[in-house]
Structure formats: C-alpha cells, structure tokens
Image (cartoon, rainbow, N blue to C red):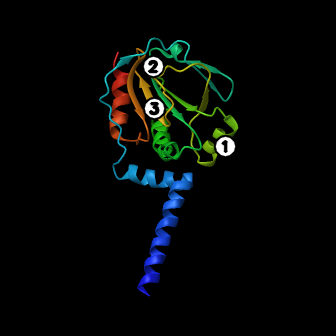
C-alpha cells in the first residue's frame, strides 16, 4: 500500500512539473505568484548610460504610425519588449498594465510595448483576451544592443534627455512602488 501511494505522489509531482514546464500559462501563473510574494522586484539604481542617439530607433503601431524615439526627447520613455509565447512576459503583463493604466494620461511619459514577433493579429488578440489596455507596436528599425540584446522580456526606461536610466532583462513586478516613484522622479527632473 505504501509503495502504491508513493508512486501516485511521484506521478502527480511529475505531471505538475511537466505542466509548469510545457504550458506557458501555467508557468506564467507560477511566476506571477512569485512576483506577488516579493520575488522579481526590479532594481532602479542603474547608472544612466548614453545611447549614441535615439534618432532612427523606430516602432510602428497597429494603425501604421511610426514612432521614432528621437522625436520623444523631453519625455520619459518606458519601452517593453515581449512576446505572446513568452511565459515571463505573460507573467509580468498584469503589473505592466497596472503601471500603464496609472500613467497613460500623463503627457510626460510614453509607453511602447514592442511585440518581438511583430504579429499585430496575435498580439492584439492577446491584449483583448486579457483585457489589457496597452497599445502594441512592432520594431521597425535596428535596435542598439545596449537597448535590446534579444532576451525576453526586456524593459528599458529613458529619461527626458534620452539617457538609458533603467534596463532589466527578465520578469519583474512593474506595479512596484519603486518603479512608480522612479518614473515620477524622472518626469519631474529637468
């Protein structure tokens, strides 16, 4: 009897482990839970780096409008690279949506959510299905490696002068008070 019970528990453990590894929503759910208990808190103490120029770094929104980061000087830019198939991206989306909702009407902060796949149909459906209000863009130019080296998710924040003030690869809780305070500090700095 003990042998059978032990095998049942082992089989259940392996099934749960496989579900977490193979099902993106299950992995995202686990990561989101870890975010809520304090893991994945982003550090905002990164030094400011100069990116040669933001001019020419372009994104296209769902309506075909081209956004050039060089044209956004004088605004704080929150830029997130993500993909619908990426479990860590999916896990951090609720916190990013909360942050976006808090600042979306602030004329001093611009949010760009760059779908790494550039598939507006897929990413738009994802946003609608999850009731996220964030506008989706796709990359339209070369992106300097200092900004995006290919890891998903990657989030960068530029200050009003176009300096790279924050860069984080991997999942993070962007609804964290440290990020809200950081964005407020950047937008109020000349």
Image: 159 above or below 170: above
Report, in whole angstroms, how far the alpha carbon at label 1 lies from the one at label 3: 22 Å
Q: Mark 3 — residue?
A: 155
Camera-near label (2 vs 1) is: 1
37 or 10, nearer to the observer: 10
Cα separation, mark 3 vs mark 2, equals 16 Å
Label 1: few (<14), some (14–19) or many (≥20) C-alpha neighbours in 10 Å: few
State the residue in front, 171 or 11: 11
* Sequence-earlier tag: 1 or 3: 1
As displayed, is residue 84 above or below residue 141? Answer: below
Quadrant in which the C terminus is drawn = top left
> Image point 46% across, 68% down: which residue?
13
Q: Which residue is mark 1?
A: 125
Between discs 3 and 2, the one toward the N terminus: 2
**Callout 2: few (<14), some (14-19), or many (20+) C-alpha neighbours within 10 Å?**
many
Nearer to us in this view, 84 or 188: 84
> Which comes sooner in the sequence, label 2 or label 1?
2
Say above or below: 82 vs 110. below
Residue 115 left/right relative to 161? right
- Identify the residue at the far bottom of this view: 1
User: What residue would you read off at disc 2?
Assistant: 75
Drawn side of residue 122 relative to residue 20, left or right: right
């Amino acid at each position: 009897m003990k042998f059978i019970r032990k095998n049942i528990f082992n089989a259940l453990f392996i099934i749960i482990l496989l579900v977490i590894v193979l099902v993106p929503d299950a992995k995202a759910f686990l990561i989101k839970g870890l975010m809520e208990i304090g893991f994945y808190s982003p550090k905002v103490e990164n030094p400011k780096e100069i990116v040669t120029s933001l001019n020419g770094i372009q994104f296209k929104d769902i309506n075909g409008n081209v956004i050039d980061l060089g044209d956004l000087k004088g605004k704080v830019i929150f830029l997130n690279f993500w993909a619908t198939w990426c479990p860590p991206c999916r896990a951090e989306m609720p916190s990013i949506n909360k942050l976006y909702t808090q600042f979306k009407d602030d004329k001093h902060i611009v949010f760009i959510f760059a779908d790494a796949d550039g598939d507006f149909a897929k990413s738009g459906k994802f946003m609608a299905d999850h009731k996220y209000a964030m506008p989706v863009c796709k990359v339209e130019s070369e992106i300097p490696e200092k900004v995006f080296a290919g890891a998903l998710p990657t989030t960068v924040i530029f200050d009003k002068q176009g300096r790279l003030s924050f860069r984080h690869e991997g999942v993070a809780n962007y609804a964290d008070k440290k990020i809200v305070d950081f964005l407020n500090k950047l937008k109020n700095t000349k």
